[in-house]
Image: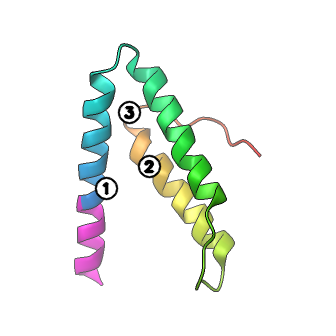
Amino acid sequence: MEELNGRMIACQILITGLIARVANDQPDPLRFLSEFRDEIRAVVSGIRIGGALDADRVRIIAQQTVDELFSLMKPPSPPSE
């Protein structure tokens, strides 16, 4: 399990770096990060989670992970419902 967690953390770091690189190439990096994060949060909110006993908990953890990925680049937006 520790190996899987290590690989997931490595993937998160890689993805965060790629997003930051793309944002730096944009004329308005902060706006790009905000829009991209909002799109990812919308995807997490709308996908069907199968095979989980508690799909709502999985969704909450996924949203928190998205916020963590972007937290170093931009503070999270207030939750919208």
Q: How far apart are marks 2 and 3 (CA)?
A: 10 Å
- Considering the numbered disc 1 on the image, is that residue within a helix, a strand or a loop? helix
First reached walking from the N terminus: tag 2 or tag 3: 2
Q: Mark 3 points at which residue?
A: 73
Mark nearer the N terminus (2 vs 1): 1
Dividing the image into 4 quarters, which one contains the N terminus? Answer: bottom left
Q: Give the range drawn in magenta.
A: 1-10
Image location (x, y in percent) of residue 54 = 66, 80
Circle 3: residue type = Met
| On screen, residue 60 above or below 68 | below
* Contact check, label 2 and label 1, Cβ < 8 Å: yes
Numbered tag placed on residue 12 in the rendering: 1
Residue in front for this viewpoint, 21 or 8: 21
- Residue 5 part of the magenta segment: yes
**Amino acid under disc 1:** Gln
> Residue at 64% of width from left, 86% of height from top?
53
**Which residue occupies 66% across, 37% down?**
78
Q: Which callout, 2 or 1, points to the residue nearer the camera?
A: 1
Residue at position x 60%, y 35% in the image: 77
Q: Which amino acid does label 2 sit on?
A: Glu
User: At numbered mark 3, what does the secondary structure look like: helix, strand or loop?
Assistant: loop
Instruction: Indicate the position of residue 11 as horizontal and vertical percent values.
Output: 27, 59
Query: Callout 1: 10 Å neighbours few (<14), some, many (20+)?
Result: some
Which quadrant of the view contains residue 32?
top left
- Our reading of the magenta stretch's main secondary structure is helix
Residue that mark 2 sits on: 68
- Position of residue 26 in the picture relative to residue 50 (left or right): left
In this rendering, the answer to whether 45 lies above or below 67 is: below
- For label 3, count other residues whose C-alpha is less than 10 Å away and answer few (under 14), some (14-19) or many (20+): some
* The stretch drawn in magenta includes residue 73: no
